[in-house]
Amino acid sequence: MPESVPVRCPVCRRAHVCTAPSYPCACGAPTAVRLDGTVGPAVLAHRAWEEEWVTVRCTACGRGNQWPHPELGCPCGTFLRLAVSDTPPAALHGPGPAAPAPPPAPDPDPASVPAPAPARRDPFRPVGIRTARDAVTATALYLRWLGYRGVRRADQRPPSGVGLAAHGLVARVDPVLRPAAPRDVECLWLTAMTESARCAYFSLAGYDEDARACADTLGVPLFVLDLTGTPAPVNGPGRALAEAGAA
């Protein structure tokens, strides 16, 4: 269970008790940022993308996941960035479970070796969307659930919204309350073409009819984000990506 730590706002001196949110690792185990109660919070005056994420290593599988840096909104109107412990979770909570024994060597006779069963993903565990930042977090979690590695902020910024990138994929997250237009889809597709990558579009307000037709022509997967944080595919390429994942 994530631990709670006392936090005092340096502006109004209000006392709070904060608990870092827990997110699911790709292996299914819950992971949480370790808060450092011995260091006071920092007043968040401006945002930089490289400061928005913190790497947390899963104690079950050892995978390094990037989760949003924990923050707190004080009733006085001050936003605080909470201090995070540098101590790895494995050292704090003990070693993770022992690695399973290796499987027995396969039978040398090819005829007796069964075909491998297709991999099955655990159910996606969404996070609720209340802000534009939540929409980006929900999309990043979904891309990791699909199997994409190294999800991060894209080097090339889209005309609007937020660009995400992973190994072999670029994605655009549109948290604005207007349907995406054909030009938005085309810009994402062109960006993916220049990077020789696949692409996917995630929108809170959906897409107009021309944007959907454009995406179908270009093969761009479209997803709509609901307020539970669950992306739903709304065209054929989107459904194909949701079923196949990053494979």
Image: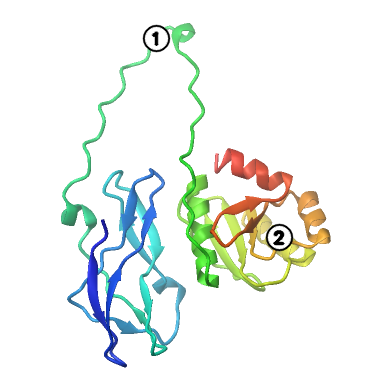
Closer-to-camera residue (24/156): 24
Residue at the image point whose x is 49% and y is 47% from the top: 124
Task: Please state if 73 lies on the left or on the right of 231 as rendered.
Answer: left
Location of the N terminus by quadrant is: bottom left
- Judging from the image, the colouring scheme is rainbow
For the residues labelled 2 and 1, the Cα–Cα distance comes to 48 Å
Q: Quadrant of residue 231?
A: bottom right
- Residues under numbered marks 2 and 1 in contact, where contact means CB atoms less than 8 Å apart: no
Q: Position of residue 24 (x, y in %)?
A: 39, 51
Type of amino acid at the residue the image marks with label 1: Pro
For the point 77% across and 66% down, the residue is 181
Quarter holding residue 159: bottom right
In this view of the protein, can residue 197 be seen by the observer?
no
Q: Which residue is mark 1?
A: 108
Q: Position of residue 200 (x, y in %)?
A: 64, 54
Q: Under tag 2, what secondary structure?
A: helix
Residue with the mark numbered 2: 190
Give the mark nearest the N terminus, 2 or 1: 1
